[in-house]
Amino acid sequence: MTYYKEQRIKLLFEKLSNEKRGGLGVFITASDPSLQISQDILRGLPAAGADMIEFGMPFSDPMADGPTIQAAGLRALKAGGSLKRTLEMVEVFRKTDNNTPLILMGYYNPIYNYGVENFLNRAIAAGADGLIVVDLPPEEDGELCLPAIKHGLPFVRLTAPTSDNERLPVILKNASGFIYYVSIMGITGTQSFAIEGVRNSVKSLKSHTELPIAVGFGIKTKQDVSEITRIADAAIVGSAVVDVIEKSLDANGNGNAKTVEDALALVQDLASGIRPKPQL
């Protein structure tokens, strides 16, 4: 059994605390719009200002995602994306970056088909730092969460505006790494957050857990990042980055150097909401 020994998530949030700032998490879908372009974007994210990365495992039925990320998943699958390829991309990323936390995000079906033990061993060996699996509630912890804990791999929990004081202890019981607070009701990329609602929810969450709180869904601009990181430990941006990727594609859906440039330029701009712009 491969055991996760890294502490990249923990070390990141300690670093952010010492720097007295929030962090920026960025989501992209592996192999969107192609293996090489996706790998180039992935490699460039830390220098552009991403403190951590959520790497989407492409799946044909991403029920929690809006049209933008759904389309990215379909492009990735069309380009030959798979769970196996995603893990290979993580391995390549780790050859040049041994510090940036990378969390695999997606759905259980591809993991189940790959084999849970095989997946956990391979993900840890490749260099993944945690899992976010959106369609496995706490009642199904035996499927993947508890095996991940046995391997020492952080299992990040999602909470939502509907997660009340009775439900939260159930959700948080086996959580590790950080807590992902979903700031809106519904799917990704379709609405904007209400800052007062987020503020109240983060305050409530912090009374239930000592884990860092990252907020995602509905965060699109550097102003959003700035607002969120005043009240939470990190802001996560996904659909806005994926949308820029999509807009750069040609009529045949192919990417180019501009795809990488535009995606990283947006991340650089988002990061300027919490710190001076880095030099790409």
Image: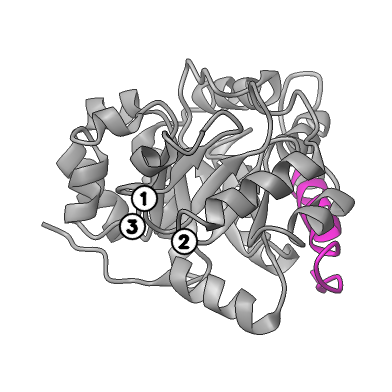
Name, please, the residue furthest toward the front. 166
Q: Amino acid at mark 2?
A: Leu
At which x and y percent is residue 252?
74, 19
Looking at the image, which residue is at 25% across and 29% down?
140
Q: Amino acid at mark 1?
A: Ala
> Do the CB atoms of the residues marked 1 and 2 lie less than 8 Å apart?
yes
The answer to whether 164 is drawn above or below residue 213 in the figure is above
**104 displayed left or right of 193:** left
Q: CA distance from mark 1 to mark 2?
A: 9 Å
At which x and y percent is residue 260?
74, 48
Give the crowd class for mark 1: few <14, some 14-19, many >=20 residues within 10 Å.
many
Which of disc 3 and disc 1 is earlier in sequence?
3
Residue 126 badge: 3
Is-magenta flag for residue 275?
yes
Q: Secondary structure at mark 1?
A: loop
Magenta-highlighted residues: 259-280
**Quarter of the image where one finds residue 43:** bottom right
At which x and y percent is residue 79?
54, 27
Which of disc 3 and disc 2 is earlier in sequence?
3
Q: Amino acid at mark 3?
A: Ala
**Quarter of the image where one finds residue 150:** bottom left
Nearest to the observer: residue 208 or residue 225: 208
At which x and y percent is residue 53?
57, 54
> Which residue bears the numbered disc 1?
175
Q: Quadrant of the C terminus?
A: bottom right
Q: Is residue 85 visible?
A: yes
> Which residue bears the numbered disc 2?
211
> Do the CB atoms of the residues marked 1 and 3 lie less than 8 Å apart?
no
Q: Secondary structure at mark 3?
A: helix
Q: CA distance from mark 2 to mark 3?
A: 25 Å
> Do the CB atoms of the residues marked 2 and 3 lie less than 8 Å apart?
no
